[in-house]
Image (tube, coloured by chain):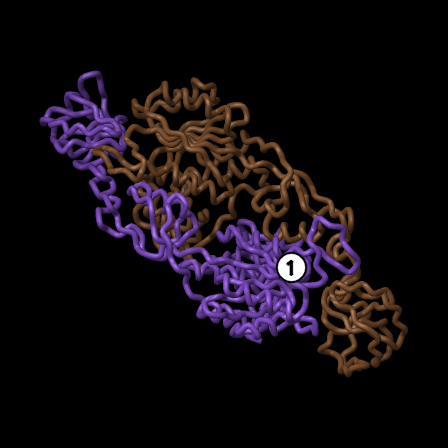
Chain colours: A purple, B brown
Amino acid sequence: MIEVNKAIEIIEANSTKMPTKHIEVSKALGYVLAEKVISPIDMPPFRQSAMDGYAFAHSIRHQYDIVGTSQAGDHSNIKLNTTEAIRIFTGAFVPDSADTVVMQEHVMANKDSILIAEMPEKFSNVRPKGEQIAKDAVVFEANTLITPAAIGFLASLGITEIEVYKKPKVAILVTGNELMQSGKKLKKGKIFESNSMMLEAALQTIGIEKTKVYRVKDNLKATKKALSSILKKYDIVLVSGGISVGDYDFVKEALLQNDVKELFYKINQKPGKPMFFGSKNETLVFALPGNPASSLTNFYIYVAPAVKNKMGFSEIHKPKVVRKINSEIKNDTGKTLFLKAKYDETNVTVLTGQSSAMLNTFAIANSLLIVPEDVEVYKKGQLVSLLPID
Amino acid sequence: MIEVNKAIEIIEANSTKMPTKHIEVSKALGYVLAEKVISPIDMPPFRQSAMDGYAFAHSIRHQYDIVGTSQAGDHSNIKLNTTEAIRIFTGAFVPDSADTVVMQEHVMANKDSILIAEMPEKFSNVRPKGEQIAKDAVVFEANTLITPAAIGFLASLGITEIEVYKKPKVAILVTGNELMQSGKKLKKGKIFESNSMMLEAALQTIGIEKTKVYRVKDNLKATKKALSSILKKYDIVLVSGGISVGDYDFVKEALLQNDVKELFYKINQKPGKPMFFGSKNETLVFALPGNPASSLTNFYIYVAPAVKNKMGFSEIHKPKVVRKINSEIKNDTGKTLFLKAKYDETNVTVLTGQSSAMLNTFAIANSLLIVPEDVEVYKKGQLVSLLPID
């Protein structure tokens, strides 16, 4: 049995990044750059007006004749003399002969001329060519996550394809003779299998759209055979159930017989203690507890960061949220507790119903309160750390 | 011009919820329940062992003969007498004649009998039928967001379909003669159009997978005609650009001529001041500034909550993150500032490059620091509120 932080460390140390691929920028949301991106153009590509107003060559004069117009999209490089100005709009080309734009609110204008009431400083309201980024400069370093803003910036530079880390292929192997698929009438002694659908949805929240689900009876031979073929085809394998100490739990044995290297088994935490983590070649194997809330807790704490690590994320753990706790929490277990909790703008409430079999509490939680193993009590009003969950 | 909080209020007051539809639970991630869900079964459906161990009728005896086994999935209702126990596993059916399970770590066992070393209290380790939820009880109230945990819980109850609010259909109308689509060689005076791809990605992060993009030249007739057909077909219309005060901005006029009711125009904020919000029937119209960073800021502050509101979310605003600020921030504008910022576990840093045209800063930010209009300074080390962004 190992500590939570040690388990997190071991998983990180044993994750390798995925191979890379080319992808269209428009489809790259949630991917991570595998190499740096260089700008093919200056941005802005020309000197641009930052305002609706009038462009002119700065001098001591306050009155100018209007001799033309530059709308966004135009490119007439008119030659202004010292007494001339043009009407200009935000984003429009500033002629080489102008150096300053006065905003329209600061002039008195008629059809033919303007009188500048509030004189701007020279070079005001003109965005220099390449101000945002120069041609051949680095747009983004490798390992940058592609967000909506990153997509916008790449598109504004005319970049249509980028090199990213592939997303891992994930399989879920469900074990358990007691499990029935929903949609049928429940037989005596059986329960509906729900972990696979839950884990598929949890994977979707971190960008893994498609997951293949396999099902196997609780016996060594069937489990071993199923794993043998799954281990060859997937980058991450989640085994659901069959990992506690009971006589009828064959999963660990089936994993070891498939040459999966055990990296740890059991973590000093509640819920979710009986978890196995191992690897075979580049494939990571998480054997998660069958209890739904334990399974999902371990997904958020261990599996999600491992998926992000393979995808090339530089930050694989979500930033913690800090809040005042609404009630005293005791920890006499010597284990790290992960408690379903709900936080608002100022406080956090630990929810009732923390049993490892109970998912209903999880469904209304927005975070896990982490009580480290060496903390015996959180007093009411104390600031505590939360892991936000989606 | 109105205040930020007033703008948020007006948008919320004018949003109506979408119609509802039936959906498979397995596809319901990110949807919101339109009606409450009732449990069709008791969960657990039978008295269940919470441990691997032995089931027996509690008494003063410490020694019991092992007369059978109950694995998960079994349903043999064996009649135990006072000297008998059965081997039992986590999740398995507890016979009516047993009332207590002792965990295997607390007994000495041989093939035929056990000696209980540490006697549990009566009823220990037996999960009562219906402990998690009783048949006909409310599983989730209306307006519950379907999370991975909710999917797991619904599936565990054998529920395969639920009633949810539809997601809104969203169109983006791009205006601007200066805009070219990326993939071509940039012409003089032009820039690559990037806002539509950025807004599509931003919509994806809140569950709107498909968005239709329309493009129109900067003139009243074309804009009016395009809007006329778009307004009939979509629940939310985002117009990108053409909303500032320049002579060549036709969008507001085109909206008014299409009987879009103006609910506000211009917000006392920086960036993102020139925004129009209106409605026609149930359709909401946001005319966003053309500057990319302004556009994305207003998406996060105004559009995303409106989308969530239509989808039935009970909490349409993300909880704020509170952090210590790394540097002094002055606000002499009298406006609310939204500053691109990056926070870690303890601090927040305001990034350089806050211009409304610059997206590169946004791409490395993970939050917007909100400086309200009536705050003139945030001192270094002060706690400040952030809106996290994905």
Q: Residue at x 51, y 42 (%)?
A: B207
Depth check: A172 or A144 in front? A172
Please give left or right for residue A313 compared with residue A245 in the image.
left
Q: Residues within 10 Å of mark 1 (few under 14, many from 20)?
A: many
Corner quadrant of residue B249:
top left
Depth check: B49 or A209 in front? A209
**Quick check: can you spot residue A252?**
yes
Give the x, y percent position of residue A380: 60, 60
Please give left or right for residue A71 compared with residue A289 in the image.
left
Corner quadrant of residue A243:
bottom right
- Disc 1 marks which amino acid? Pro
Q: Residue at x 76, y 62 (%)?
A: B127
Q: Residue at x 62, y 67 (%)?
A: A223
Q: Which residue is mark 1?
A: A292
Please give left or right for residue B55 compared with residue B274 in the image.
right
Corner quadrant of residue B273:
top left
Q: Is residue A126 above or below residue A191?
A: above
How many marks on residues? 1
Give the x, y percent position of residue A136: 22, 50
Question: Which of the chains bears the disc numbered 1?
Answer: A
**The N terminus of chain A - image quarter:** bottom right
Depth check: A302 or A240 in front? A240
**Quick check: can you spot residue B275?**
no
